[in-house]
Amino acid sequence: MEFLPLFHNLRGARVLVVGGGEIALRKSRLLADAGAVLRVVAPEIGTELRELIGSSGGEQILRGYSEADLNGCVLIIAATDDEPLNAQVSADARQRCVPVNVVDAPALCSVIFPAIVDRSPLVIAVSSGGDAPVLARLIRAKMESWIPPTYGHLAGLAARFRHQVKKLLPNVQQRRAFWEEVFQGPIADRQLAGQGAEAERLLQAKIDGEAPPATGEVYLVGAGPGDPDLLTFKALRLMQQADVVLYDRLVAPAILELCRRDADRIYVGKQRADHAVPQDQINQQLVVLAKQGKRVVRLKGGDPFIFGRGGEEIEELAAHGIPFQVVPGITAASGCAAYAGIPLTHRDYAQSVRFVTGHLKDGTSDLPWKDLVSPAQTLVFYMGLIGLPIICSELIKHGRSADTPAALIQQGTTSNQRVFTGTLANLPQLVAEHEVHAPTLVIVGEVVTLRDKLKWFEGAQAGV
Ligand code: SAH
C-alpha cells in the first residue's frame, strides 16, 4: 500500500494554500467544507476564492510565498503553476514535518487528495496513489450512482442511537448483527424514503424489545420500456432488496435478472384478451404478501401510473394500511420516441403531446376524437394495435389528414426494436405487411417526419 488512507479532522485548523487560481479554489472549497481555516497566499487571488475566504473566516495574503507562511498550519497545499515554487513549498513543509500536497505532482506530496463520495457523515475516499486519478474518479462516479444521496442519513440515524444500543448490547457480535438488521431492513427503507421520524420510531421500538411490525411493504416500481439501462437507481435498489417480485408480461427478462437472486418471482402478466391473473386478485396478492411481512416489488413495464393500473393497486394497499412506495419509470412513449428518433414535441410541429389508450372498450370507438384531431398535437397510442384500423379511420373521419405521418414502434428500446413509418392511411396495412405484434406503440403527428430528417437508423441509440 503506497498511501495509508486517514480521515483528517480539520475543523478549526489552519491550512495554507499557496496559489490563487482555479485549482487553489477547488482545493479551498473542499478544505472549507471540512471546516478548515484557510490562509491563502498569492500575488493575485480570484474573486470566487476571495469570497470563499471571506465567508469561511480565513485570511488572504496578497504577495509571493514566504516560508514563514507555514507557521501555525497543519496542512500545506501548493496549487500554483510555478513548478520550482511548488517544489520549494513541498521541501519547506517536509522540513517542518507538516503534511503537504502539491497538485498534480505526486512525487512532491506526503498526502494526496482522494476522489470523494460525500454522504456525510458517511464519506468514501478512492485513490490510485496519484497514478491514475481519472480511474479513481470513474470508480467514484460508479459509487455515486449506486449509493443513494440520502444514504448518509442512515449513519446519522445510527449515531443518534449508538449509545443506547451499546448499553443494551455490550457484546460486539450482537451489536454487529443488530446494526446489520437495521441497515438492511424496513428501518433503513423508511429512512431512505425520507421518513426519518418513522425510522426513529421503529428503531426505538426495536431497542425496547418490541416485536418488529408484522407488515411488510410494497414497492410499485416502474421498470421502463425494456432496456435495463433505463431503470432508475431507486428501482434497482428496491429490486435488490425484495423478498418477492410480482411482474408483468412487459417486464423484460434482462430486467428481472437484476432482482435479488433469492427473491420469489411471481408472474402475473396479462395478455390482452386472456387476463392471466385478474387485477383484483393481484391487488389481494400484494396485500397478503405484505401482511406476511414481506418486502414486495410490484414490477411494471414503463411507468406504474401511466396505463399501469398502479392507482388501483395502491388504493387496495391504502385500504389495508400497508405501507408502499411508488417509483416512476420511463414510460413507453418517452423510451420509444427517444430510441426511434422521434421528438414528441417540437417548436415547429407539435406544441403538445397526448398519451391515449388505444384499447377500445368492446371494440367500439369511445375516444374523444374531436379533441384528438386538433393540429400541432402529437398523439401516442398505447395498446393500439388491435384497434388501429378504427383509430386511423376515426381520426381521418374527424378531420385529421390521411397524410398525417405516423409510426409503429415494436418492442421499443430493446435489441428487437422495429420501427415502421407511414401515414394514417396506410398504417394498418403496415401492421399486416410486417407482422407487427405487441408491445407496439403508435405515434401520430408531424414529428414523425423528424426521424428521416435526423437520418435516424436502428441502433443509432446506444444500447440497441
Ligand atoms: N405502464 C406502461 C404502459 C402499459 S400499457 C408504460 O408506462 O409504458 C401497455 C402498452 O404500452 C403496450 O400495449 C404498448 O402499446 C406500450 N408499450 C410498453 N412497452 C413498450 C415497448 N417497449 N415498445 C412499444 N410499446 C410499448
Image (tube, grey):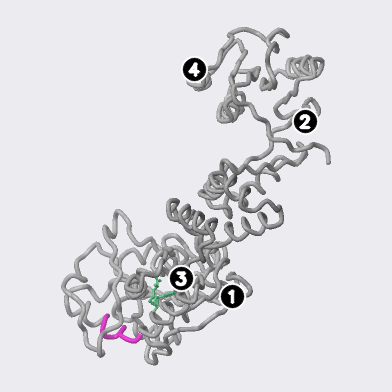
Residue located at (82% from left, 15% from top)? 95
Q: Which residue is mark 2?
A: 106
Front one among 271 and 429: 271
Q: Is residue 281 left or right of residue 411?
A: left
Q: Which residue is mark 3?
A: 215
The reply to whether the residue tagged 4 has its Cβ within 8 angstroms of ligand 1 is no
Q: Amino acid at mark 3?
A: Thr
Q: Which residue is mark 4?
A: 54
Callout 1 crowding tier (Cα within 10 Å): few <14, some 14–19, many ≥20: some
Residue located at (73% from left, 35% from top)? 6
Res 430 → quadrant: bottom left
Q: CA distance from mark 3 to mark 2?
A: 54 Å
Magenta stretch contains residue 406: no
Q: Amino acid at mark 2?
A: Pro
On screen, 194 above or below 98? below
Q: Name the residue at the bottom extreme.
A: 274
Q: First in sequence: mark 4 or mark 1?
A: 4
Q: CA distance from mark 2 to mark 4?
A: 30 Å
On screen, 51 above or below 423? above
Residue 370 in picture, x, y percent from top left: 16, 73
Res 72 → quadrant: top right
Q: Is residue 447 left or right of residue 452?
A: left
Under tag 3, what secondary structure?
Answer: loop
Q: Which residue is mark 1?
A: 263
Residue 407 in picture, x, y percent from top left: 38, 73
Q: Amino acid at mark 1?
A: Ala
Q: Amino acid at mark 4?
A: Gly
User: Does residue 239 appear anywhere in the picture?
Assistant: yes
